[in-house]
Amino acid sequence: MDTPTQADESAGIQFAMQMLKQVPRGNPAELETHITGVLIVFWGALWGSFGTEYARGFVEAQLRGMETNVPHETFVEPTVQ
């Protein structure tokens, strides 16, 4: 992973940890609502990063295959044995 990506991830984790420090104390209804919000933020960040990494890997693989002097797959008709 490159340095800018690592910096973005570190900033995201730091933000999430700051959110956890803001958890209200005492009232169970407020606590449940706050924790639900925190979980939604965490899951959103997690799924967003998975989608980004998958898409980046897919696109990079396609671009590598388009470079000159790169062997390509050969498609042949299946034979019955």
Image (cartoon, grey):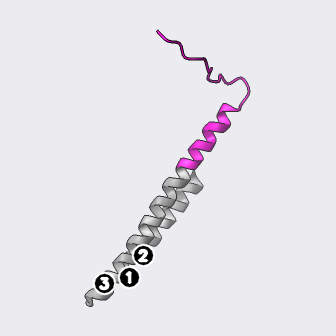
How many residues crowd mark 1 within 10 Å: few (<14), some (14–19), many (20+)? few
Q: Nearer the viewer, residue 36 or 17?
A: 36
The residue under label 2 is: 18
- N-term mark: 1 or 3: 1
- Tell me if 43 is positioned left or right of 53 in this view: left
Q: For numbered disc 1, what is the local secondary structure?
A: loop
- Tell me if 33 is positioned left or right of 2 in this view: left
Q: Are marks 2 and 1 in contact (CB under 8 Å)?
A: yes
- N-term mark: 2 or 3: 2
Q: Above or below — where is 67 with respect to 22?
A: above
**Residue at horizontal 56 percent and vertical 55 percent from the top:** 5
Q: Amino acid at mark 2?
A: Gln
The image quarter containing residue 20 is bottom left
Q: Which residues are magenta?
A: 54-81
3D distance between C-alphas at marks 2 and 3: 16 Å
The residue under label 3 is: 31
**Residue at horizontal 62 percent and vertical 21 percent from the top:** 75
The x and y percentages for residue 16 are 43, 71
The x and y percentages for residue 21 are 36, 78
The x and y percentages for residue 52 are 55, 54
The residue under label 1 is: 22
Q: For numbered disc 2, what is the local secondary structure?
A: helix
Q: Residue furthest bottom?
A: 27
Q: For numbered disc 3, what is the local secondary structure?
A: helix
Q: Is residue 77 magenta?
A: yes
Q: Residue furthest front?
A: 80
Q: Is residue 58 magenta?
A: yes
How many residues crowd mark 3 within 10 Å: few (<14), some (14–19), many (20+)? some
